[in-house]
């Protein structure tokens, strides 16, 4: 796979001990950057106040992302750290499972059902619009499919899953991943601003981030940049979206196989299970256990804090794996299609969330 | 030769867990350790 931003390695040695050891420098770097972000949040505000400076309160999420961006784009990420930095997705998924402790099952079902309805509308709208846009800009058909799936469902994971299912080129998936990541990075800075300008509630903003930001790490970060409550809702909405990945990828696999340009899908149930994100099940399991008081109040607090630490490593990874120089090399047209599509989808989902907010009186 | 003979790679990949599954196992193990009191307090 051609990686869009920093080329995070996938090559594994046959020695499991070496595979584990080579993760350590990068994981330590993630932890150091995340912790530095947390310290900066606590101390910069205090320092500014002590010196009577006017300085906005910057959350640890943004500090961790900014420090990561600085290292990746100014110094560059040395090879020794790359394997460990690539674990940011592992921490993201573990953090989402642990976050289940902060949702009682009733909340999940209530919010999940609202999210599910909005997600269904968002997926259909995004696929239709991106397909139209890809054709209008004369993109290759499989690149259009990858961009449509990436913007409709869940970013990089969906693109990788679809790439395998429709036999798309490495180059096409590289373009699509670069477009989704670049736009996700932009969303980190624009979404909180728009949310504050429009005075969105935590609930509405979190739902909007989960619906409109395509990659799970960026959706979680964009939500957490607004507030803790918005971050929780962004993750829930995004998790609902992720749960749809198998169905959308299956539909594309069948479409391309019917045109003789991909392998036919044999066992559809096995295909769905293979593509289904398992962390959604882990999230639901922890939520069920919390609902039936398997954990006491202190234990729920400990689980929630562990989830925050896992997200801290994720946010550091989001910054470290974003390299604007590498992204620029991928070409302009997929970015143009991605950017136009994302702006339209962001506006469309904002309108959906406004409608739901009025209907449900959030 | 039997048609069901799987290559060593195929056998290995059948038993290899995805990143998702490892993350779920890690989180469930952490939750269990917190539940049984091995991990008592996680500061933030």
Image (cartoon, helix red, strand yellow):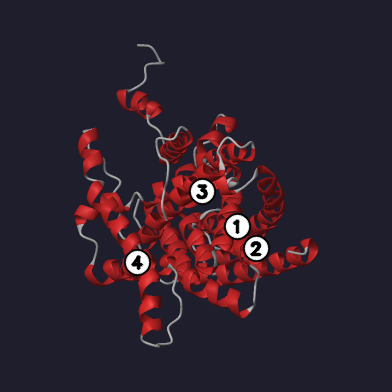
Residue at position x 36%, y 72% from top? A43
Tell me whether marks 4 and 2 sit on the same chain: yes
Q: CA distance from mark 2 to mark 3?
A: 21 Å
Q: Nearer the viewer, residue A93 or A144?
A: A93
Q: CA distance from mark 4 to mark 2?
A: 28 Å
Chain where mark 1 sits? A
Tell me whether marks 3 and 1 sit on the same chain: yes
Chain where mark 2 sits? A
Lower sequence index among marks 1 and 2: 2
**What x and y, as percent, mark residue A74?**
25, 72
The residue that disc 2 covers is: A203
Q: CA distance from mark 1 to mark 2?
A: 7 Å
Q: Quadrant of the C terminus of chain A?
A: bottom right
**What x and y, as percent, mark residue A161?**
48, 45
Asked whether the residues under the numbered discs 1 and 2 touch, taking CB atoms below 8 Å apart as contact, a structural biologist would say: yes
Chain where mark 4 sits? A
> In the displayed structure, does residue A172 sit left or right of residue A274?
left
Q: Can the viewer see residue A233?
A: yes
**What x and y, as percent, mark residue B18?**
41, 37
| Picture disc at residue A39 | 4
Lower sequence index among marks 3 and 4: 4
User: Given this view, does label 2 or label 3 mark the residue nearer the observer?
Assistant: 3
């Amino acid at each position: 796979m051609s990686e869009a931003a920093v080329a995070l390695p996938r090559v594994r040695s046959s020695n499991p001990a070496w595979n584990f050891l080579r993760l350590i420098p990068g994981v330590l770097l993630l932890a150091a950057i995340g912790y530095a972000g947390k310290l900066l949040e606590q101390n910069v505000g205090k320092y500014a106040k002590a010196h009577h400076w006017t300085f906005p309160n910057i959350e640890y999420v943004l500090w961790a992302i900014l420090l990561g961006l600085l290292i990746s784009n100014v110094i560059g990420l040395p090879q020794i750290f790359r394997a460990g930095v690539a674990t940011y997705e592992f921490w993201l998924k573990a953090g989402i499972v642990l976050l289940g402790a902060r949702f009682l099952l009733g909340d999940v079902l209530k919010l999940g059902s609202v999210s599910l309805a909005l997600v269904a509308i968002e997926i259909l709208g995004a696929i239709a619009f991106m397909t139209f846009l890809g054709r209008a800009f004369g993109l290759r058909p499989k690149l259009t499919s990858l961009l449509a799936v990436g913007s409709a469902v869940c970013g990089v994971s969906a693109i990788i899953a679809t790439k395998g299912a429709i036999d798309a080129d490495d180059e096409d998936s590289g373009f699509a991943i670069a477009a989704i990541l670049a736009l996700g990075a932009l969303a980190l800075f624009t979404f909180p601003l728009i949310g504050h300008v429009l005075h969105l509630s935590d609930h509405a903003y979190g739902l909007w981030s989960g619906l409109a930001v395509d990659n799970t790490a960026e959706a979680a970060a964009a939500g957490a940049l607004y507030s803790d409550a918005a971050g929780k809702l962004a993750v829930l909405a995004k998790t609902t979206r992720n749960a749809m990945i198998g169905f959308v990828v299956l539909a594309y696999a069948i479409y391309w196989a019917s045109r003789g340009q991909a392998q036919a899908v044999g066992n559809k149930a096995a295909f769905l299970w293979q593509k289904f994100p398992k962390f959604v099940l882990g999230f639901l399991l922890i939520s069920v256990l919390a609902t039936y008081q398997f954990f006491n109040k202190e234990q729920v607090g400990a689980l929630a804090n562990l989830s925050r630490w896992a997200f801290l490593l994720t946010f550091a990874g989001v910054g470290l794996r974003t390299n604007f120089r590498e992204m620029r090399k991928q070409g302009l047209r997929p970015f143009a299609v991605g950017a136009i599509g994302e702006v339209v989808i962001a506006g469309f989902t904002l309108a959906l969330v406004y409608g739901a907010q009025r209907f449900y009186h959030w | 030769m039997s048609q069901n003979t799987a290559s060593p790679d195929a056998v290995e990949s059948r038993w290899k867990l995805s990143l998702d599954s490892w993350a779920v196992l890690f989180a469930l193990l952490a939750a269990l350790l917190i539940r049984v009191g091995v991990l008592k307090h996680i500061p933030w």
